[in-house]
Image (cartoon, rainbow, N blue to C red):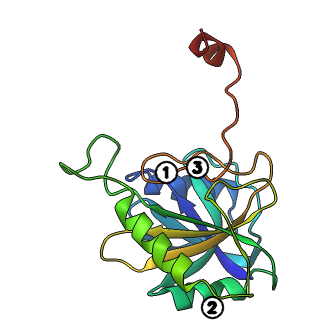
Amino acid sequence: MTHFLFCVCQLGAEPAVKFELAALRPELRFAYSRPGLVTFKSPTPVAADAPLPAVFVRAFGASLGPADDATKVFTMLSGTCPPGHPVRLHVWERDVSRPGEEPPGFRYGPRAAEARAALVAAWPEGQHPLLAGEVAEPGDWVLDVIVAEGEPWWSATTSTAPATRRSRAGGSPSTCRPRRPRGPIASSRRR
């Protein structure tokens, strides 16, 4: 198990995440950050499925840390995921700018697709069966790999359960099946 929690947020919201987590989880200590990614150290192991009712956090889970290649990712995964347990691979790019302020011609996706292809090609046989597709089902063990230009991959694990995962915006697509919108705003959208 790891003692680190990762939180993905919109670029520029890192101070709000630090402030919010100081109130929600005072036992956590700030550990590391990059634009759109903040990690915290916990005095106790961080469970992959631990809830976090943070408003400014798009996605979160147990942080495994940086990895320069697929072998390092698989080594870190083996230390946290039960042997033989199937894994859903989810690779995405963290924000490079605020939504709508991306550099001209920039597209999210190619860097993540390249990293995903490298991980799938090197996936070790028999260690953890790789589940097909990127949409997680409740109960899936998810290996999150967050990528950014010129940086090592950031690896983390999450375990999906109903109502514990959030929709991701920007360069980070959702890992769970989308739920139907509810309430007065949703009903006006259906017309």
Under circle 2, the secondary element is helix
Depth check: give the residue in front, 145 or 86. Answer: 86
Residue 33 found in image quarter:
bottom left
Locate residue 152 relative to residue 70 in the image: left or right: left
Q: Amino acid at mark 3?
A: Ser
Q: Amino acid at mark 2?
A: Thr
Foreground disc of the pair 3, 1: 3
Q: Is residue 108 above or below residue 177?
A: below
Name the spot of residue 127 as percent of width and height, x first: 73, 87
Name the spot of residue 32 as percent of width and height, x first: 48, 74
Q: Is residue 29 above or below residue 173?
A: below
Depth check: give the residue in front, 169 or 70. Answer: 70
Residue occupied by mark 2 = 75
Write the residue at 56% across / 61% down: 7
Q: Is residue 93 above or below residue 106?
A: below
Residue occupied by mark 1 = 16
Depth check: give the residue in front, 128 or 19. Answer: 128
Name the spot of residue 94 as percent of width and height, x first: 42, 60
Locate residue 117 relative to residue 42 in the image: left or right: left
The numbered mark at residue 174 is: 3
Other-residue count near label 1 (Cα within 10 Å), few / some / many at <14 / 14–19 / ≥20: some
Q: Amino acid at mark 1?
A: Ala
Q: Earlier in the sequence, mark 3 or mark 1?
A: 1
How many angstroms separate mark 1 from mark 2 (CA)? 33 Å
Under circle 3, the secondary element is loop
